[in-house]
Amino acid sequence: GESVGLHLPTLSVQEGDNSIINCAYSNSASDYFIWYKQESGKGPQFIIDIRSNMDKRQGQRVTVLLNKTVKHLSLQIAATQPGDSAVYFCAERSATDSWGKLQFGAGTQVVVTP
Amino acid sequence: GAVVSQHPSRVICKSGTSVKIECRSLDFQATTMFWYRQFPKQSLMLMATSNEGSKATYEQGVEKDKFLINHASLTLSTLTVTSAHPEDSSFYICSARDNRISQGRGSPLHFGNGTRLTVT
């Protein structure tokens, strides 16, 4: 399944399948990107990050792809599990911001079905 | 490591009263902390950047006199919602950047578990 995270859409994925969550960003000055997972009633949890001098980074069951040409970021989750059900946010940091603050995208709700 | 604690987790207050929310970094020092606000089914919106020993920097449209921020030490920042109204009801989340990481700007922020504020 695939989803564009611009207005909190829902991505329904069957357990065991791969998930792809997309995020578009607009700031050309952004040089650092992070994916966070947020479960209901909790704060965001770090999943994986990528700097702008890379186009791919892999973690455990997760891969982040960055396409700076079209300002697009994606998160791939392999073998999606019920515990992956949550809202996923991409966040970006501008190279011009002295404090390193993060701006969040709209988010995507991932629902894992048995 | 890198735990951020927020207190309280939930608070209900009456309209016109003030509420203080604490954000603590438990096992690291944070010169810089950030306060976010999140409405249901929406994203996190940055409210302000809190810096230890100096005035907070507020995002456009955020009233500094309504949302008072005090970063009194390297492990504590507080957000006080003054004269709260029902429209201030929201989920407030803080985050902190670990001073130990030399390339701080290129490291992820650590988030607290948020404070659910309900103003009646």
Image (cartoon, rainbow, N blue to C red):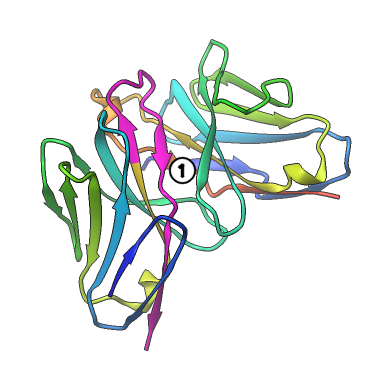
Q: Is residue A10 above or below residue B6?
A: below
In the image, taking residue A31 as reference, residue A43 lies left or right, namely right
Task: Depth check: give the residue in front, B3 or A21.
Answer: A21
Query: Please, what is the three-letter code of the amino acid marked with disc 1?
Result: Phe
Q: Position of residue B61 (x, y in %)?
A: 62, 28
Residue at 42 percent of width and 35 percent of height:
B27
Q: Chain of mark 1?
A: B
Task: Classify the position of the N terminus of chain B by image quarter.
Answer: top left
Residue A102 inside the magenta-drawn segment: yes
Residue at 17 percent of width and 48 percent of height:
A66
In the image, taking residue B57 as reference, residue B1 lies left or right, namely left
For label 1, the residue is B111
In the image, taking residue A80 as reference, residue B27 lies left or right, namely right
Q: Position of residue A52 (x, y in %)?
A: 17, 36
Task: Depth check: give the residue in front, B10 or A14.
Answer: A14
Residue A74 inside the magenta-drawn segment: no
Q: Quick one: SS at disc 1?
A: strand
Q: Position of residue A27 (x, y in %)?
A: 31, 34
Start and end of the magenta stretch? Answer: A92-114
Q: Is residue B71 above or below residue B16?
A: above
Q: Position of residue A90 (x, y in %)?
A: 35, 49
Task: Depth check: give the residue in front, B65 or B101.
Answer: B65
Tag 1: Cα neighbours inside 10 Å, few (<14), some, or many (≥20)?
many
Q: Is residue A85 above or below residue B74?
A: below
Residue at 53 percent of width and 11 percent of height:
B53
